[in-house]
Amino acid sequence: MFYFTEDCVIGIESLDDDHRYLFSLMERAMRMLLAEGLGDRYEKVRRILEELNDYADQHFAREEAYMKEIRDPELIRQRTQHDFFRQKVCEMQFVNIDDDDEQQRVLTDLMNFLSKWLYRHIIGSDIMIGKLPPLEEWMLRENPCEFTDEYRTGITLIDAEHQELFRIIEEATKVVKSYSVSDSYDEILQILERLKDYTKEHFQDEEEYMESIGYDGLEAQKRAHTAFVERLESIREEDIDQNPQEYLQELIEFLLGWLVKHILYTDKKIPNQSL
């Protein structure tokens, strides 16, 4: 059975109460799975899945609102994990569970998923809520990958290329959120390769522009660009293989964070001498 023990307490009463409720749902599902001779469990399995779906909507909204309020740096990762949970439960709701065997299979899959996801999520992520330095404002947005006016340098070519970099990172983010080994792995590698190639092209264009106007910050920019490209070049498939979704999520957060800071604090200092 599953019990809400002291190591699952994160110290935020409303969220701890939500987690207790989820444990109670898991216990009901496990008893249903282990019980013999219950016959048709269609309505009970359907009700469990509906309650899990409602739980996800309400609890995740509360948790994310609280994290946004305190500008918690785990917010972006939490949103990804929450989306993964919602997607998994939604997939199960569309499975045909008219016969006993399918009901048993869905319950088994559900318990395997919940037992792994829940402990890892609470102990690996929720336990850190409120314990890390606050986020910068841009990371609180529902879509941190959105290219907004604050990122514009006023240099047409550079702004257009920055916007494309944001678009590629957003594309990677969407794939990681709905990650499945069979469908997403090759797609992610292709996106990362495209990001690498486009980044090199952009840095070259940006450096040529700075050189054309005699910008005295060119050398510092080149050093920053080289370091970023080296980080992209260092990505190895064997590193991704160990824990693909977690590795890729951390990588995307790094890439997006670097890009935002580089634009806001470095690129926006480049003089606008566009014709």
Image (cartoon, grey):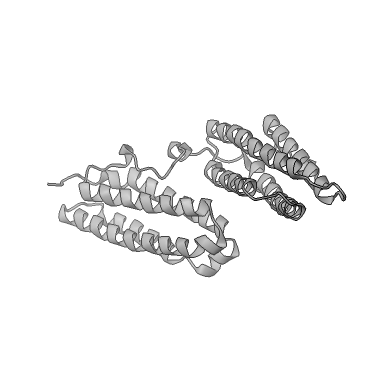
Question: Picture coordinates of residue 100 (x, y %)?
Answer: 77, 52
Q: Is residue 1 left or right of residue 166?
A: right
Q: Is residue 92 left or right of residue 218?
A: right
Can residue 162 be seen here?
A: yes
Q: Nearer the viewer, residue 101 or 275?
A: 101
Question: Picture coordinates of residue 35 (x, y %)?
Answer: 86, 49
Question: Picture coordinates of residue 83 (x, y %)?
Answer: 56, 45
Can residue 130 be seen here?
A: no
Q: Is residue 143 left or right of residue 152?
A: right
Q: Is residue 196 above or below residue 157?
A: below
- Residue 122 falls in which quadrant of the image? top right
Q: Is residue 208 left or right of residue 82?
A: left
Question: Picture coordinates of residue 150 (x, y %)?
Answer: 32, 38
Question: Which residue appears at 64% of the width and 45% of the height?
Answer: 93
- Residue 247 falls in which quadrant of the image? bottom right
Q: Nearer the viewer, residue 53 or 171?
A: 53
Q: Nearer the viewer, residue 152 or 187?
A: 187
Image label count: 0
Q: Nearer the viewer, residue 184 or 152?
A: 184
Question: Which residue appears at 79% of the width and 46% of the height?
Answer: 40
